[in-house]
Image (cartoon, rainbow, N blue to C red):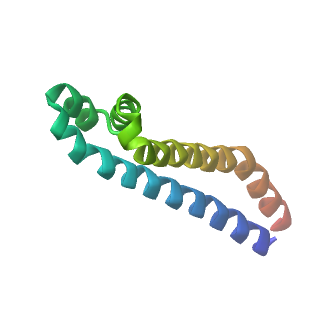
């Protein structure tokens, strides 16, 4: 079971790391560009870390579709990591605890 637990932890860690990286790259790709479009664009982008850049990319999709896609995929990967962690995590811990009794 040690290999299964290690694989589970690595899978969740890689999903979370790639998700956060994509969110960060998308945020960095939209935040500086939003300053060029006035305060009505940069204020939500700055104050709402996920929804703001996503909204800005949606408003200017022809120019910022790549950062918008990066934010969406990063958010989906993070949600998947949390779903796997909280969906399968307790079952794996129960199996580990049953083996150690």
Relative side of 47 to 72, left or right:
left
Residue under the point 73% across and 49% down = 90
Residue at left offset 77%, top offset 57%? 92
> Where does residue 41 sit, x and y in percent of width and height?
23, 30
Extreme-front residue of the structure? 62
Residue 50 visible here: no
Residue 54 to residue 77: above or below: above
Quarter of the picture holding the N terminus: bottom right
Between 59 and 93, which is closer to the camera in this rendering?
A: 59
Residue at screen point 50% across, 61% down: 17
Please determine whether, in this image, residue 9 is positioned above or below residue 38: below
Above or below residue 33? Residue 37 is above
Q: In the image, residue 24 lies at what x, y percent?
A: 37, 53
Q: Residue 64 occupies which quadrant of the picture? A: top left
Q: Judge left or right: residue 77 versus residue 23.
A: right
* Drawn side of residue 31 relative to residue 18, left or right: left
> Residue 95: percent from the left, percent from the top?
82, 58
Residue 66 drawn at (x, y percent): 44, 48
User: Quick one: 76 or 92, which is closer to the camera?
Assistant: 76
Determine whether, in the image, residue 33 is placed left or right of residue 68: left
Q: Is residue 52 visible?
A: yes
* Residue at the bottom extreme, as displayed: 3
31 or 17: nearer the viewer:
31
């Amino acid at each position: 079971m040690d290999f299964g637990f290690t694989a589970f932890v690595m899978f969740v860690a890689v999903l979370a790391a790639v998700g956060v990286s994509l969110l960060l790259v998308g945020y960095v790709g939209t935040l500086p560009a939003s300053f060029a479009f006035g305060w009505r664009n940069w204020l939500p982008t700055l104050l709402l870390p996920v929804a703001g850049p996503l909204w800005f990319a949606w408003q200017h999709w022809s120019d910022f579709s790549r950062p918008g896609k990066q934010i969406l995929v990063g958010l989906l990967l993070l949600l998947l990591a949390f779903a796997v962690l909280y969906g399968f995590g307790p079952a794996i811990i129960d199996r580990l605890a049953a083996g150690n009794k």
